[in-house]
Image: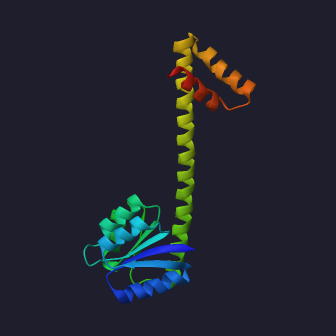
Amino acid sequence: MKKALLISRSEKSANSLSELLRSEQYFQIAVADNVTDAKKLAEKEEYDLICINAPLSDESGIDLSKHFAGTTRACVVIIVPQKNADEIYDILTECGVLVIAKPINRHLFHHYLQFTECFKMRILSVARENEKLKHMVEDIKLIDRAKFLLITCLNMNESQAHRYLEKQAMDLRISKLQVAKQVIKTYEN
């Protein structure tokens, strides 16, 4: 079930936007009417979409959009008056915030939200790949540390240390990383 956080100073606008979001399959919608409450809600819960109906009672909505774009994985959308849309677009696009001009066209809003879903899936894919690469780098660091220990403690050269780790992994039927961890445990005491 998709979750949305809606920030709007007007209760009437919040009701209209909630209805629009429900038609887009957002059935869990939290509503805030100021920046402080919105930030508290976002700290407690992870949302798929954060929708800001600007301006807010305590700020324009631009800083809040930047905040959410930088601190959450949610798609961030700001709805702004038509007269400010181009200026705000120039400010927020590089932050990854989608800017929608008022009045909202229901059909276009549907497509905007489809775009945000697509964008979010792409970002999550990149984040997963990034995590995988981080783990690979950490594994390489451990293996290199084990090679260094073999070189310094057992007077092996680099190719001998590399071959030792590979042969142990093959003989013991465990990964080279597991062998490296055993070497580190043995020689770092």
Q: Is residue 105 visible?
A: no
Against 185, is 60 above or below? below
Say which of 3 and 77 sits in front: 3
**Residue at screen point 56% across, 51% down:** 128
Say which of 181 and 115 sits in front: 181
**Residue at screen point 54% across, 57% down:** 124
Indicate the quadrant where residue 170 lies: top right
**Residue at screen point 35% across, 73% down:** 85
Question: x and y percent of residue 41 in the render?
Answer: 39, 71
Q: Is residue 155 left or right of residue 95?
A: right
Against 189, is 138 above or below? below
Question: x and y percent of residue 15 in the render?
Answer: 42, 87
Question: x and y percent of residue 9 in the render?
Answer: 31, 82
Looking at the image, which residue sits at the far front?
A: 189
Looking at the image, which residue sits at the far top?
A: 155
**Residue at screen point 31% across, 78% down:** 83
Q: Is residue 161 visible?
A: yes
Say which of 84 and 113 sits in front: 113
Q: Is residue 63 left or right of residue 147?
A: left
Question: x and y percent of residue 43 in the render?
Answer: 39, 65
